[in-house]
């Protein structure tokens, strides 16, 4: 027997004189294992919940009330996000929603095109997992355990829908009394907002080891079109499309049950696990770039450009995420005054003389930063007091005859220091002696400095051309010994060449590598043997690929 159940319509929170207040019902089938069935309709609670992001002529959606960048800016409006939350709360209060009659709303906050909001209660405590299935032999099921312990009230964002397919969503209840129950819903998802591939081209390596858990997050699809973060699973299947206003997101940070990421050149966003934008931080006269990290106080350190000055990518600012206050912490020009003066060009009002591209927090008000323009890694101390250079890692020939040559650590073995490096990562290890740490990175293995053309990079026997034939980039791992004043290359292997951008990440015993200009990312086992590679299309490059389990946020392993 089929019984229609219609959720009550509510008024649009984005009323405009030219728009009608339409409410659509998206049909969802609910099947129990005993062959009984019911149809539960998902009300698109208001135009503000779904319509703003919908493309015309897609299944189970309606035409967009706004388009392009305007629609994305509507998403990152905290007041409107709060109105959506209020509308959802009203819907929850108006009905009785058990696991058999869950309230489900497609992407209500507009932040992830491939997501479904769900709310329901259970008579006893239950843990919930879910599976998304589509009828397509090339697309494997997507199963995750949601982030909650035994509880009677359930509110989640289910990510991983497949666009332009009927998605079967199975909720699996594990009750406190030891019993289990599955309830299945179906939903036909509309099209993507972007032009990215639903399924990436994959190539198997010779390693038989398992891929690490998590989703590959594509950070920086840098194009002239709309900008997104993409989530891909281990099979190269798209499981998330997160819209941003522009530029790129550089990494995901997690704190206080929130996820933080950049959404434009001068804004950071705070999002909860339901997909609601709970805060947007405007950086004022500063533009962010490349990277950000939390300190021990929960403040965010951000690589920045002071837009009132004639140099770029040479500042570090602090964002207080509790108040939104922004303050300057480090001006690299104050630390390198004579070097900056030596490359200064009065005709260049955007002088990129150091080009910071990564920041790592070390504790005790100390940081590491990566300078691509000088192919140097710099440790800075007392950043909240009187910042000073503690030491540097880089080629001695680059800094010889400068005021900074004595700040270079010595090499403990024979190797060529990193050149054009990206994505440096600081690693503490309890097995190491005091004053020691590991530092790994994507060594682009490319010599170039646009502001210091006098230096001859070819003397290092490294590629100096963007399209150098047979060139490779490298994974580099150093053991840094501050007590001895040395750094040692303890691990390295070749990876596909990318003269610019790119990233590496050690996760679960494996290594994820993004060779950004090759539009290719790979995962290697602990012996550096390729497990699988993924290739995507793009206009410029893939800035970074980091893998996240989202444990404690969306999921619980």
Image: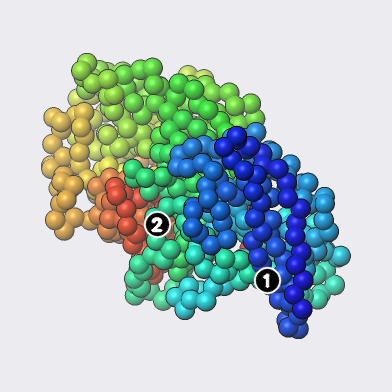
Q: Residue at x 53, y 62 (%)?
A: 59
- Classed neighbour count for the residue bearing mark 1: other residues with Cα under 10 Å, few (<14), some (14–19), many (≥20): some
Q: Is 412 left or right of 234, judged from the image as shown? A: left
Residue 201 seen in the figure: yes
Task: Point out residue 354 in the picture as x, y percentages from the top left corner.
Answer: 30, 29
How many angstroms separate mark 1 from mark 2 (CA)? Answer: 29 Å
Q: Say which of 268 and 198 sits in front.
A: 198
Q: Earlier in the sequence, mark 1 or mark 2?
A: 1
The image quarter containing residue 324 is top right
Give the answer, above or below, for where 384 lies relative to 362. Answer: above
Q: Nearer the viewer, mark 1 or mark 2?
A: 1
Task: Point out residue 508 in the picture as x, y percentages from the top left corner.
Answer: 50, 62
- Classed neighbour count for the residue bearing mark 2: other residues with Cα under 10 Å, few (<14), some (14–19), many (≥20): some
Give the quarter of the figure containing the C terminus: bottom right
Q: Is 437 left or right of 472, judged from the image as shown? A: right
Task: Point out residue 55 in the picture as x, y percentages from the top left corner.
Answer: 49, 52
Q: Is 247 left or right of 494, judged from the image as shown? A: right
Q: Say which of 500 and 110 sits in front.
A: 110
Residue 428 seen in the figure: no
Q: Residue at x 33, y 62 (%)?
A: 535
- Residue marked by disc 1: 29
Element under label 2? loop
Give the answer, above or below, for where 474 lies relative to 436. Answer: below
Say which mark, if any, is on residue 205.
none
Q: Residue at x 65, y 30 (%)?
A: 322
Q: Residue at x 74, y 42 (%)?
A: 86
- Residue marked by disc 2: 196
Give the quarter of the figure containing the N terminus: bottom right
Task: Point out residue 388 in the picture as x, y percentages from the top left corner.
Answer: 42, 23
């Amino acid at each position: 027997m089929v019984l229609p159940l219609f959720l009550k319509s509510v008024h649009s929170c984005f009323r405009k004189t030219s728009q009608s207040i339409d409410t659509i019902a998206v049909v969802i089938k609910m099947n129990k294992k005993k062959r009984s069935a019911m149809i539960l309709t998902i009300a698109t609670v208001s135009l503000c919940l779904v319509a703003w992001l919908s493309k015309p002529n897609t299944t189970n959606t309606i035409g967009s009330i706004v388009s392009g960048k305007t629609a994305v800016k509507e998403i990152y409006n905290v007041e409107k996000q709060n109105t959506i939350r209020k509308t959802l709360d009203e819907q929850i209060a108006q009905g009785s929603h058990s696991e058999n009659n869950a309230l489900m709303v497609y992407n209500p906050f507009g932040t992830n095109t491939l997501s479904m909001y769900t709310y329901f209660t259970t008579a006893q405590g239950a843990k919930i997992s879910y599976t998304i299935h589509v009828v397509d032999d090339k697309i494997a099921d997507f199963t995750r355990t949601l982030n909650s312990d035994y509880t009677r009230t359930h509110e989640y964002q289910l990510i991983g829908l497949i666009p332009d397919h009927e998605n079967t969503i199975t909720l699996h209840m594990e009750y406190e009394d030891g019993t289990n129950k599955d309830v299945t819903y179906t939903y036909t998802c509309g099209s993507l907002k972007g032009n990215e591939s639903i399924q990436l081209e994959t190539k198997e390596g010779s390693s038989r080891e398992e891929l690490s858990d998590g989703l590959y997050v594509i950070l920086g699809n840098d194009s002239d079109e709309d900008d997104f973060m993409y989530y891909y699973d281990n099979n190269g299947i798209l499981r998330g499309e997160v819209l941003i206003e522009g530029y790129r997101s550089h990494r995901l940070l997690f704190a206080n049950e929130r996820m933080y990421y950049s959404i434009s050149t001068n804004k950071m966003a705070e999002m909860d696990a339901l997909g609601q934008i709970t805060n947007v931080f405007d950086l004022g006269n500063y533009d962010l770039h490349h990277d950000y990290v939390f300190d021990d106080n929960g403040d965010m350190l951000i690589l920045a450009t002071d837009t009132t000055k004639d140099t770029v990518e040479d500042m570090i600012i602090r964002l207080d995420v509790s108040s939104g206050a922004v303050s300057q912490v480090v001006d690299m020009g104050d630390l390198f005054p004579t070097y900056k003066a030596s490359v200064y060009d009065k005709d260049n009002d955007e002088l990129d003389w150091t080009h910071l591209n990564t920041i790592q927090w070390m504790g005790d008000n100390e940081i590491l930063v990566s300078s691509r323009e000088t192919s140097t890694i710099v440790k800075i101390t007392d950043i909240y007091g009187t910042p000073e250079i503690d030491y540097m890692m880089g080629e001695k020939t680059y800094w010889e005859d400068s005021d900074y040559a004595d700040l270079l650590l010595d090499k403990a073995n024979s190797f060529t220091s990193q050149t054009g490096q990206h994505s440096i990562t600081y690693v503490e290890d309890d097995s190491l002696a005091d004053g020691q740490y590991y530092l790994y990175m994507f060594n682009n293995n490319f010599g170039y400095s646009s502001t210091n053309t006098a230096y001859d990079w070819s003397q290092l026997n490294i590629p100096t051309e963007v399209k150098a034939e047979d060139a490779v980039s490298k994974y580099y791992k150093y053991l840094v010994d501050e007590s001895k004043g040395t750094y040692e290359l303890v691990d390295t292997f070749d990876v596909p060449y990318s003269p610019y951008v790119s990233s590496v990440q050690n996760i679960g015993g494996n290594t994820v590598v993004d060779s950004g200009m090759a539009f290719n990312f790979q995962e290697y086992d602990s012996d550096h043997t390729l497990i699988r590679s993924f290739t995507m299309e793009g206009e410029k490059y893939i800035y970074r690929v980091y893998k996240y389990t989202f444990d404690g946020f969306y999921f619980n392993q």
